[in-house]
Image (spheres, grey):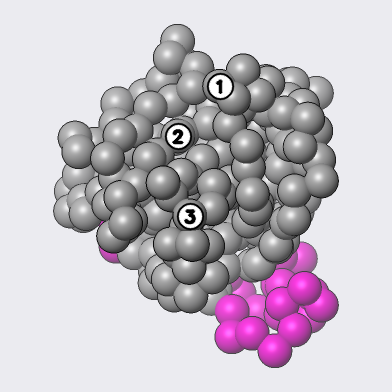
């Protein structure tokens, strides 16, 4: 039976500082490391044998996968990294403090940028501190200068269909260690959610979401391994 585990990375330094992070490559905090390890312990306690792991090219997700798999006693699991599993690109908001940005632009506008499905933040100006075009991990790729959840889904979906789904269809148990919005994009695909429904879905950090799938990769059952830290899941 195909089994999918979605794991959002643990707390990062910029999460702690309340800054828009997006594609900036910040590391985990000590709390984030503990969350990742706890996620792995939950996987081990549930008796789940992972066959393959997919993650982004950002350190906080990569280290979450390493720490979780090590805590699960499965550090040997093959891992694939790809930028298409990166967090949503926050455009011109990248690096800004969220509270200060709300004070400047208004809380309602910032809420639209953060939580709407198809309204992106202002684009990132080229050539600045957070211009990723010369970063070698993106060599040859056409990169966004801002993203909404919709355009995040537009880049995640082909990767899901071309790389992750075939592993699941082969009966593998797959761990995807990624980010809040790239995982929300996968949740929207799997559960067939509308643009309105996905707005209210939040994947908690470090809490593995276990999804059992049928042969057509439709969810049969889904639950968070840490029930005390679970958030509401879409109906199956």
Q: Is residue 114 above or below residue 222?
A: below
Secondary structure of the residue carrying tag 2 is: strand
In this picture, residue 217 sits left or right of residue 71: left
Per the model, the C-alpha gap separating discs 3 and 1 is 18 Å
Magenta stretch: residue 136 in it?
yes
For the residues bearing labels 1 and 2, Cβ distance under 8 angstroms = yes
Label the magenta part by its dominant secondary structure. Answer: loop
Residue density around tag 2, few if under 14, some if 14–19, many if 20 or more, within 10 Å: many
Q: x, y (%) of residue 31? A: 73, 21
Per the image, the residue denoted by label 2 is 210
Q: x, y (%) of residue 94? A: 61, 55
Per the image, the residue denoted by label 3 is 171
Query: In this view of the protein, can residue 21 be seen by the observer?
Result: no
Secondary structure of the residue carrying tag 3 is: loop
Q: Which residues are magenta?
A: 117-143
Q: x, y (%) of residue 184? A: 40, 48
Q: Nearer the viewer, residue 42 or 106?
A: 42
Residue density around tag 3, few if under 14, some if 14–19, many if 20 or more, within 10 Å: some
Q: Point out which mark residue 230 bears.
A: none
Image-quadrant location for residue 200: top left
Q: Nearer the viewer, residue 57 or 18?
A: 57
Per the model, the C-alpha gap separating discs 2 and 3 is 15 Å
Secondary structure of the residue carrying tag 1 is: loop
Q: Is residue 27 above or below residue 130?
A: above
Per the model, the C-alpha gap separating discs 1 and 2 is 10 Å
For the residues bearing labels 3 and 1, Cβ distance under 8 angstroms = no
Per the image, the residue denoted by label 1 is 46
């Amino acid at each position: 039976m195909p089994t999918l585990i979605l794991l959002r990375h643990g707390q990062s330094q910029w999460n702690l500082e309340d800054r828009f992070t997006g594609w900036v490559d910040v590391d985990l905090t000590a709390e984030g490391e503990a969350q990742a390890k706890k996620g792995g312990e939950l996987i081990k306690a549930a008796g789940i044998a992972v066959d393959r792991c997919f993650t982004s090219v950002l350190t906080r997700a990569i280290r979450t996968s390493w720490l979780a798999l090590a805590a699960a006693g499965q550090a040997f699991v093959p891992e694939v990294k790809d930028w298409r599993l990166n967090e949503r690109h926050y455009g011109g908001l990248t690096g800004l403090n969220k509270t200060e940005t709300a004070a400047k632009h208004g809380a309602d506008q910032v809420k639209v940028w953060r939580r709407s499905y198809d309204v992106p933040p202002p684009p990132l100006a080229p050539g600045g501190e957070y211009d990723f075009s010369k970063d070698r991990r993106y060599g040859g790729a056409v990169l966004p200068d801002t993203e909404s959840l919709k355009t995040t889904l537009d880049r995640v979906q082909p990767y899901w269909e071309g790389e992750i789904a075939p592993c699941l269809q082969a009966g593998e148990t797959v761990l995807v260690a990624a980010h809040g919005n790239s995982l929300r994009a996968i949740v929207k695909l799997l559960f067939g959610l509308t643009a309105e429904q996905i707005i209210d879905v939040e994947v908690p950090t470090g809490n593995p979401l276990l999804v059992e799938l049928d042969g057509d990769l439709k969810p049969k059952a889904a639950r968070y391994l840490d029930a005390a830290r679970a958030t509401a899941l879409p109906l199956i």
